[in-house]
Each structure stands twice: as C-alpha cells, then as structure tokens.
Image: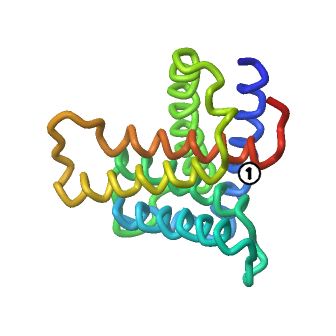
Amino acid sequence: MERTLAQYDAVVEECLALFAKKAHDYGTAWRVLRVPSLTDQIMIKAQRIRTLQELGESKVGEGVRPELIGIINYAAMALVQMELGVVDAPDLGADRATEEVRQRLAQARALMERKNHDYGEAWRGMRVSSFVDLILMKLLRIKQIEDNRGATLVSEGIDANFLDIVNYAVFAMIILDGSPS
C-alpha cells in the first residue's frame, strides 16, 4: 500500500502542478462552468482516449497521458463547483483555486485508501482501456443523474462518481507509466 500511496501522490502532484500553472496563465475562468459543462469536458477527453486506443495514432500529437491529467483536474474542478457553486465571474485567485482542487484530490485519495483496503491491489491487474471504459460509464451515470436533477433512488450521487473518476484516471496513469506492480 505504501508504494500505491507514493505513486498516487506523484500523479496528483503532477496534475496539481499543471493546474497551478494554468490557473496562473488563465486565471480561474473555469469557475463560471456549470457541473454539466465539466462533465461534458471530461467526456470529450475520455472519448478521445478511447479513439486513440482504438486507432493507435494521434494526429494532434498529444497522447493518452495529457488527457488523463485533464480528466483528473476537470473532475476535481467539478467537485469544487458542486461545493462552492457556480459564479458569474472568476472569484478565486490561483493559489486558492489550487488549494480547493488539492482538497478534492485529497478526498479522492482517502476514498481510494478505503476501497483499496477492501479490494486489495486488484486495480493493478487492469488495463488502461478498462479504466477509460469505467470513466465513460461513470460519466454516463453522472449525465443521467444530472438529467434527473440530482435525484437518485438507490445510487451514489454525482460527487461519488467524480471521486471514482479521479481514482480511475490516477490508476490508469500509474499503469501507463509502467510502474511495477
């Protein structure tokens, strides 16, 4: 488990570093995005990964890894939006936004630790393509819950699905990086 935590933390730090740089360059314009818009952004990235996996080539020059980083950051941003709400104009500085995203990624890590305890390291035997499929499934679930205006009868809410998406994308990056199991 210690190796998993170290690998997980390294992926998260890479994602946060990119998030912080983009927050510096672009500000926090993303704060105007509604959660369904972030869901759609994640869907685009996951669909692109699936297309790259099926075609085996990229004509844009960016591969799977940058898209996974985008999925992690967008899912964390969606969790921020769910808690802080959507605004009409950017209201957070880059440092505060980065800290908010860091807190949501810490929530995902805590969930991963609990689930990893129960499931063991089963995820290490999975393929990156399976994680992408699971992310797509979670996104379709989120979209259905969004279409139902958040109402569920027996299912987890949107936030739980975004947390799972973060964890699936982190696991995919660990596997993609060829880290020993």
Give 118 or 94, whichever is nearer the viewer: 118
> Colour scheme in the image?
rainbow
Residue at the image position 59 percent from the left and 65 percent from the top: 50
Residue at the image position 62 percent from the left and 65 percent from the top: 49
Q: Position of residue 79 (x, y in %)?
A: 43, 46
Q: Is residue 40 above or below residue 99?
A: below
Residue at the image position 83 percent from the left and 43 percent from the top: 178
The answer to which quarter of the image holds residue 13 is top right
Q: Secondary structure at mark 1?
A: helix
Q: Is residue 40 above or below residue 170?
A: below
Q: Is residue 100 above or below residue 55?
A: above
Most extreme residue toward the bottom, as rendered? 59
Q: Position of residue 119 (x, y in %)?
A: 55, 21
Which residue, given by chain and number where applicable, does mark 1 sit on? 17
Residue at the image position 38 percent from the left and 67 percent from the top: 37
The answer to which quarter of the image holds residue 180 is top right
Q: Residues within 10 Å of mark 1 (few under 14, many from 20)?
A: few
Horizontally, residue 50 falls left or right of residue 92, namely right
- Location of the C terminus by quadrant is top right
Q: Position of residue 26 (x, y in %)?
A: 62, 70
Q: Give the residue type at disc 1.
A: Ala
Give 171 or 12, whichever is nearer the viewer: 171
The answer to which quarter of the image holds residue 162 is top left
Q: How many marks?
A: 1
Q: Position of residue 68 (x, y in %)?
A: 64, 56
Give 140 or 24, whichever is nearer the viewer: 140
- Location of the N terminus by quadrant is top right
